Structure formats: structure tokens, C-alpha cells
Amino acid sequence: MPESRDPSDKTLHKLEEKAVKPRRRTVLERLLSPFKELFGLSHLAAILSLIGTAAMLMLAVYWFFRLAPPHTLVISSGPEGSVFHTNAVKYFNILNRNGVELKILPSQGSLENLQRLYDPRFNVDIAFVQGGISNAPQGKEVLSLGSIGYEPMLVFYRTNTTATLLSDFKGKRLAIGPEGSGTRALALSLLQLNGITNGGLTILLDLDADKAADALLAGSADAVFLTADSAPPQLMRKLLLDPQIRMLDFSQADAYTRRVNYLNKMVLPKGSLDFGRNIPDRDVYVIGPTVELLARKDLHPALCDLLLDAAKEIHGRATLLQHKNEFPAPIEHEYPISPEASRYYKSGKSFFYRHLPFWLGSLANRVLLVFVPVVVVMIPGLRMLPLLLSWKTRLRFLKWYRALLLLEHDLRGAMDEPKRADLVARLDEIEHAVNQMKVPASFADQFYSLREHIAFVRGRLAKR
């Protein structure tokens, strides 16, 4: 017959298996283990540290994504075909190859661009605006990224009109540009300086660039005012090369620049437009403001670097009216230069954007700004936490060391059996209390040292 086994043997076998097989730790215990073992925290302190660490990491992740530059920008440019609009398309191409989409909103010109920057309904981030716009909204919501080029005011008139000064156009039919254009704003300012206002014999025509040019060629307008704000360069060149049309030479250019601080004097050199036909047939002085690249104050710093890089590529070349690398430049007028733009002009792009592609530079920069400070703050903080929480444990050790010192002191002198029994009882009480202590792993050395010292005192007691 098979030998029957005692049920108690099975129970004992299961207990042995449990003793041999390690208990599987829960997820929470695994998470708490580093705090307990590395930093020597109690269970409660480890839980609080885990919660605090998780909260800090969640906040860091939130800021990591919060600080990411947007993938889309909106620019208010100018009329289609104008220099403003053409430059906006160039910005679109440069930003697009860096992973940023630029949406272009055509406009009537500088004044409308500026109004859109202040109007939250348009969500415009950047815009081209000529300096010196009168009656423009003011406020801290808009900052300048710098000037990107000159914008000369070109005044064209028919050869049968005698004019050497701007004041000679009093009583004439003048096309000064549509409402919302920087051309119109600047023309009105210059005409007012010469005592010319709308009314009486002088007629101011609100025509766009194409209609103004047609009116001038047809003889229904005596002069037109054009700038890159609203006129395409092809149209200006067409008028410059037409033998029936002349361009006004601002012989008082120095005086204008002294009276109006945002105006600049420029020279169109003799023969620069056509050497063969010697157009113009003399040096022609023109005046005009600079064009500023304005942005809302909440523009992402990384995009500021990217835009100024694009501006350097587009506007940094030499032209008839400017030298190479003259623009972009930190020239202030009504709007202060943004801090990020000032930093760019002084030291260039930041390290990551200088050596890495835009998207990778942005990623590395955000890691440096967000996660590195978290690690630098969190690890010393966790190391300091045990020091703050260890005073109670240290006091408990000191308490039993004090009791052990007193007991060893009582070993001196005569020893009888009652005294010996009392000392043994006191030592047993100390040892039992110490063995019941729960201490963090960081106090293991002190715990075992205390037990060794208890054994040392017990050995001395046994010898007595």
C-alpha cells in the first residue's frame, strides 16, 4: 500500500516554498524602492516624495510642450505684387524649409498691417510697417525686430508739369495711395510740411498703385506717390523708363531728414537703372523711412531668431539704395526693439540654433530649459529630505546609546547577584527595544553598530 503523508508535511512544504521563493513586489513598492533604498526615506516619506516627484515631472512635461514654438505664423504683408507681398513670399519659403508654415494676409499697406497687429481678431503675429506712420495705434503689445530696409518715396510726374520742389504740386491732381497704406500716410505728412492739404485747387486721389499709374499715363493725374508699401517694383520701373514721366529729385532731402527724424536721404545714382540710355540722367535724391518688421510681444523667442535669420538672407544683400549687410539693423522708431532681437543683434543665434536644425535646436533648448533644472533641483532636494527627516531616528539611537552608557557605568564597583540580575534585565530591555526599531537603509551601519555595542556590553557583564 502506498505510504500516506501527514497533511502537516504538505503545509510545511508550502511554507518552505514560500520561504525560498521571493515575494513578488507590487508596482507601488517598486516605485518606492529607490526612495527608500537610495535616499533612506520611511514608507510615508517615500510616498510623499514619489507624489512630489511625479508632480514636478508632470509640470516639466507640460512646460516642455508649452514652450515649443508654434508651427504656424501669420504675416500681414501688403497688396499682391507689392514689395511687401513679394518679401512675405520669400519669408514663407525660408520658414517652410525649417518646418514653420507662414500664412500671408494681403493688405492695403503699413497702416492696415499695424492695425491688424493690435486687433486680436486677425491673429497676426508679424507685419511689415514703414517707420513714422501717423495716427497709428500705440501700446506695449507690439515690438520691433528691427529695420529691414529703406522705403523710398518716389514721386512721379509728367514732363509737361514744371516741378522742382514738392511744394510745386500745390493745386494739382495727386494720387497718394489708398486708405490704410503707408504711402498715403507718408504722402500726407510730406504734403502738410509743404502747406498742401486736400481741398481747393489741390485734389488728392485715393487710387491704388496700378490705377494711379494708369491715371498718370492717361493725363488724369498730375503726379503719383509710390512706395514699396503698395506698389510692385515692375510698375515703378515702367514709370522710370517712360520718356513722358519724370521722377522728382528731392533737392531738399537734407532738410527733410533734419525736420523728420524717421526719414532717410538716399541717392539713386546716375545711369543706375539703364546705363545705355543713361536713366536717370543725373543723381536723384529721394527720401523715405525704413521698413520695420514688427511682431506681437508674445512671439516665441525661437521664431524671433528664425525670422531674423530670414531677414538677413533676404534683406542683407546690396541694392541701389543700400550697402551689403546694412540690414536688418536694430533701428528704433516708435516701437522698441524686442529683448530677443537685441540679443540676436549682439551675439547672433543661440548655441543650439547655430549648430542644429531648427526643430532639433528647439528640442535641445527646451530640454535644457525644463528638464535639466528639474534634475538639478530635485536630486539635491531628495538628498536633503532624509537629513530633515532623520533627526527623529538619530534621537532614538542617541536615546539607547545614552541608556547603554549609563548601564556600562553601573558595571563599575562591587557586583552582587541582585545588581547583576538588574543589569541583565536592563540590557535585555535595551536589546529588545533596539531589535524592534525600524530604520531606513541609510542608518543600517549605525543600527548594526549599536547592536555590536550592546553585545560588547553584554560580554563585559558576563565577565563580571
Image (cartoon, helix red, strand yellow):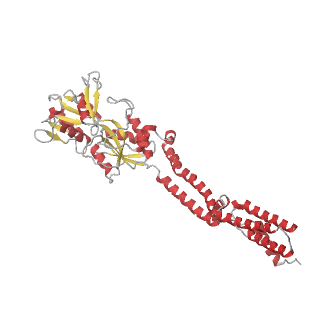
Give 272 or 430, whichever is nearer the viewer: 430
Percent coordinates x, y for residue 288 in the rendering: 27, 35
- Residue at the outermost front position: 413
Name the residue rendered at 61%, 57% in the picture. 384
Residue 213 shows up from this direction: no
Percent coordinates x, y for residue 253 in the rendering: 24, 30
Q: Quadrant of residue 424?
A: bottom right
Residue 395 shows up from this direction: yes
Percent coordinates x, y for residue 92 in the rendering: 39, 42
- Count of marks overlaid on the render: 0
Q: Is residue 400 left or right of residue 122?
A: right
Image position of 189 with respect to 384: above or below: above
Image position of 315 with respect to 409: above or below: above
- Residue at the outermost left position: 200
Percent coordinates x, y for residue 98 in the rendering: 46, 43
Image position of 346 with respect to 439: above or below: above
Q: Is residue 355 left or right of residue 29?
A: left
Quadrant for the N terminus in the image: bottom right
Q: Is residue 326 left or right of residue 265?
A: right
Q: Quadrant of residue 391?
A: bottom right
Name the residue rendered at 79%, 75% in the picture. 11
Quadrant for the C terminus in the image: bottom right
Give 113 or 160, whichever is nearer the viewer: 113
Give 36 or 416, whichever is nearer the viewer: 416
Image position of 41 with respect to 304: above or below: below
Name the residue rendered at 84%, 65% in the picture. 460
- Residue at the outermost right position: 1
